[in-house]
Image: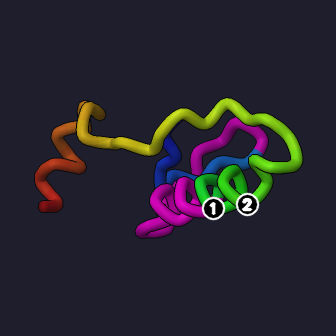
Amino acid sequence: MVSTDRISAYDVVIPTPIPGKGAVLNQLSLFWFDKTKHICENHLINSATENIALPETVRRRG
């Protein structure tokens, strides 16, 4: 699963993204999966992102 900076409400994409939103959501998930792993098992295996194919518009941002 990959989170993005895109925002949508009721299946309508809002044109103004929140920069960094996707990265923050991923880090929050990683934090809580790690904090609760002793309470219940979860599906997290790792958080490696090097194999993700990014769209051209994202790659151009640098």
The colour scheme is rainbow
Whether 11 is drawn above or below 19: the answer is above
Q: Which residue is mark 1?
A: 31
Pick out the residue farthest to the front. Answer: 38
Q: Tell me where the magenta segment starts and ends, as one range.
A: 10-28
In the depicted view, which residue is nearer to us: 54 or 36? 36
Whether 12 is drawn above or below 20: the answer is above
Whether 45 is drawn above or below 49: the answer is above
Q: Amino acid at mark 2?
A: Lys
Q: Position of residue 9 (x, y in %)?
A: 73, 48
Whether 20 is among the magenta residues is: yes
Label 2, label 1: how far apart the Cα atoms are = 6 Å
Q: Position of residue 27 (x, y in %)?
A: 54, 61
Q: Which residue is mark 2?
A: 35
Decide if residue 58 is on the left or right side of residue 3: left
In the depicted view, which residue is nearer to us: 52 or 43? 43
Which residue is found at the position 52% from the left and 46% from the top? 3
Residue 60 marker: none
Which residue is found at the position 24% from the left and 40% from the top? 50
Whether 62 is among the magenta residues is: no
Which residue is found at the position 29% from the left and 34% from the top? 52
Q: Nearer the viewer, mark 2 or mark 1?
A: 2
**Quadrant including the C terminus:** bottom left
Q: Amino acid at mark 1?
A: Phe
Q: Secondary structure at mark 1?
A: helix
The answer to whether the residue labelled 2 contacts the one labelled 1, judged by CB atoms less than 8 Å apart, is: yes
Q: Secondary structure at mark 2?
A: helix
State which quadrant residue 25 falls in: bottom right
State which quadrant residue 28 falls in: bottom right
